[in-house]
């Protein structure tokens, strides 16, 4: 009986050790996968998942009739996929907003962000950026005939509409400290708020604002630009292999004229 008990205890302990060892090895496996480059996974799975805007005309806008997302960022993502995987059809898209893009990248839901994202020193602490692939600058969108014609007209009592998680929202607080800022989840919501007079002016990158003025000719972009917003493609912090692969692809696209074709297709001004 005593022997049986001892045998049982031994068996129990062996099982515990085996279970712990298994647990340890899976944990190590997943950590390794997290630390390694996504390029390996991308090549193995033959797909690149890009975080893109779905509500931003000219850059990433969902076409309600086809369900396709269209714009400059989308075509750049497809062209990069063609360079890396030989087939632009291997690009997959997930919606991000200015607020959700970095968390979704860090969670591993997407491999890269191509979503009107400015390269900043602050963001560089959280992600790796590719070389600059588009140069924008912050500006203002107002209803035609508005008294507001430049950043100097944003005074006490002016309500400025902006989007959460954007550089525009941060910048405007510094550049027009007297005005109040109302923040929205995305650009569609912010533009709807402007149309329903929840504020007198909407601020973000000129290129995005031109898309809105294009959609509704009652609105216009005013005041020139008052910041530099160089766009970069973001990947996980430290993933140099994927950063290099994207930079190589961008260089090829610039050298072979493909980049210019995409730029001309979407950006007129
Ligand atoms: N480019 C700016 C930014 O990265 C504004 C556009 C956006 O919100 O995506 O924050």
Image (cartoon, rainbow, N blue to C red):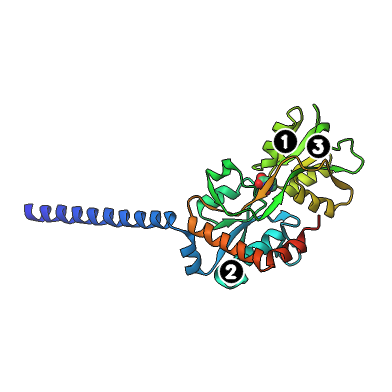
Please give the name of the residue rendered at 49% of the width and 62% of the height, measured from the top-left corner: 39
Q: Of marks 3 and 1, which one's residue comes earlier in the chain?
A: 1
- The extreme right residue here reads 145
Q: Of marks 2 and 1, which one's residue comes earlier in the chain?
A: 2
- Toward the viewer: 242 or 68? 242
Q: Is residue 1 visible?
A: no
Question: Which circle, 3 or 2, is nearer the viewer?
Answer: 2
Q: Which residue is mark 2?
A: 83
Residue 138, x across and y down, in percent? 74, 43
* Relative to 184, residue 3 above or below: below
Please give the name of the residue rendered at 83% of the width and 32% of the height, measured from the top-left corner: 153
Q: Residues within 10 Å of mark 2 (few under 14, many from 20)?
A: some
Label 3: state its secondary structure: loop
Q: Of marks 3 and 2, which one's residue comes earlier in the chain?
A: 2
- Toward the viewer: 14 or 172? 172
> On the picture, is 127 further left or further right than 26?
right
- Toward the viewer: 57 or 248? 248
Question: Which part of the image, by quadrant, shows the N terminus?
Answer: bottom left
Q: Is mark 1 within 8 Å of ligand 1?
A: no
Residues under numbered marks 3 and 1 in contact, where contact means CB atoms less than 8 Å apart: no
Question: Which circle, 2 or 1, is nearer the viewer?
Answer: 2
Please give the name of the residue rendered at 39% of the width and 53% of the height, measured from the top-left corner: 31
Distance between the Cα atoms at labels 3 and 2?
Answer: 44 Å
Q: Which residue is mark 1?
A: 172
Residue 59, x across and y down, in percent? 72, 57
Distance between the Cα atoms at labels 3 and 1?
Answer: 14 Å
Label 2: state its secondary structure: helix
Q: Which residue is mark 3?
A: 199
* Relative to 241, residue 151 above or below: above
Residue 43, x across and y down, in percent? 49, 68
Residue 148, x across and y down, in percent? 86, 36
Q: Quadrant of residue 111?
A: bottom right
């Amino acid at each position: 009986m005593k022997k049986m008990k001892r045998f049982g205890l031994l068996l129990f302990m062996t099982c515990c050790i085996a279970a712990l060892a298994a647990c340890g090895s899976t944990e190590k496996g997943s950590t390794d996968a997290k630390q390694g480059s996504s390029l390996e996974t991308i090549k193995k799975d033959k797909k690149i998942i890009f975080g893109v805007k779905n509500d931003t005309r000219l850059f990433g806008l969902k076409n309600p009739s086809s369900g396709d997302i269209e714009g400059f960022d989308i075509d750049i993502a497809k062209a990069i996929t063609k360079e890396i995987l030989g087939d632009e059809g291997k690009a997959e898209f997930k919606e991000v907003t200015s607020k959700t893009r970095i968390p979704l990248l860090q969670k591993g839901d997407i491999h890269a962000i191509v979503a009107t994202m400015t390269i900043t020193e602050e963001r560089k602490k959280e992600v790796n950026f590719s070389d600059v692939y588009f140069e924008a600058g912050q500006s203002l969108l107002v209803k035609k005939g508005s008294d507001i014609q430049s950043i100097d007209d944003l005074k006490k009592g002016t309500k400025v509409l902006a989007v959460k998680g954007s550089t525009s929202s941060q910048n405007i607080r510094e550049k027009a400290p007297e005005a109040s800022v109302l923040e929205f989840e995305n650009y569609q919501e912010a533009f709807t708020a402007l149309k329903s007079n929840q504020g007198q002016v909407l601020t973000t990158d000129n290129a995005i604002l031109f898309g809105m003025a294009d959609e509704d000719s009652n609105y216009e972009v005013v005041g020139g630009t008052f910041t530099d917003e160089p766009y970069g493609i973001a990947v996980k912090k430290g993933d140099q292999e994927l950063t290099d692969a994207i930079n190589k692809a961008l260089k090829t696209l610039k050298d072979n004229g493909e980049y210019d074709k995409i730029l001309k297709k979407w950006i007129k001004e």
